[in-house]
Image (spheres, rainbow, N blue to C red):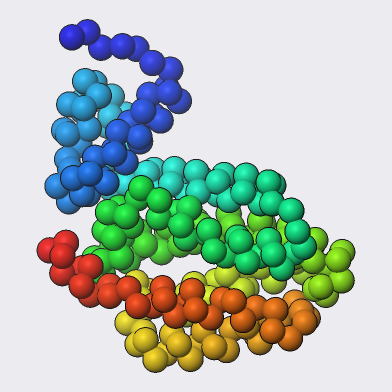
Amino acid sequence: MSRITKKPESRRAQIIEAARHLFQTQEYEKTSMQDVIIRLNIAKGTIYHYFPSKEALLQAVIEDIVDKSIEEMKNFIEQTSGNALKKMLLLMSIGNLATLNDNENILNHLHRHSNDIMHLRLLTATLAKQAPLYAQIIEQGCKEGIFKTKAPLESAEFILYAVQFLTDKGIAPYTQEEIDRRAKAFPKLIEQILQAPAGSFEFIVKPIQQSGNCDCDETQNKGT
């Protein structure tokens, strides 16, 4: 079978999509660069021209996952009517789902302790791109008189990073008791940051507690 010549950006995207499919269906550890080469019927030099290693290819897959999840979130918010609190609730509820959709095996791989650096890259890349979306909603809330802050982007960054990094068992071996304690404190802390009405963010407690119920050690053991 003859190989089809593609433009560089098209070929790179094709390699990322093929790798994402293989990482998801047969897991990252069981996938080799040769598997991607065979799937696409491309020369060995082609894949290494774009990605010098499997780790570099995984990084590109992660960035692609993040970009697509952010696009889904943007579209969802644009199609949603209602005040800032309603949009904040919806955004927080779909944030993780947009990233997890069809990518569970890849993300489970990142939660293993041997992948701490890659896990942090995924988190920071995701939060950095989510923050402007939250800032946009916070600005809307300020116009509506629900929130009061002169730093919507910084407020969004502070909230997102605090919630994620203080409850993610992939970052530190937090106990469920620690996560529950923080989850119960977050609503009032966020209300203070945004000067929001009392009780505005009680809805985040259960999702945070439930996210902590994921047994990362069990996930790690399954992958070894």
Left-right relation of 148 to 189: right
- Vertically, is 17 above or below 200? above
Q: Position of residue 201 (x, y in %)?
A: 65, 78
- Vertically, is 38 above or below 207? above
Residue lying furthest top in this view? 2
Q: Position of residue 122 (x, y in %)?
A: 42, 57
Residue 60 visible here: yes
Front residue (pair 30, 222): 222
- Which residue is drawn at the image coordinates 37% and 86% (left, top)? 176
Left-right relation of 113 to 186: left
Number of marks in the rendered image? 0
Left-right relation of 141 to 106: right
- Vertically, is 111 above or below 183? above
Q: Position of residue 224 (x, y in %)?
A: 12, 63
Front residue (pair 80, 40): 80
- Which residue is drawn at the image coordinates 63% and 66% (left, top)? 89
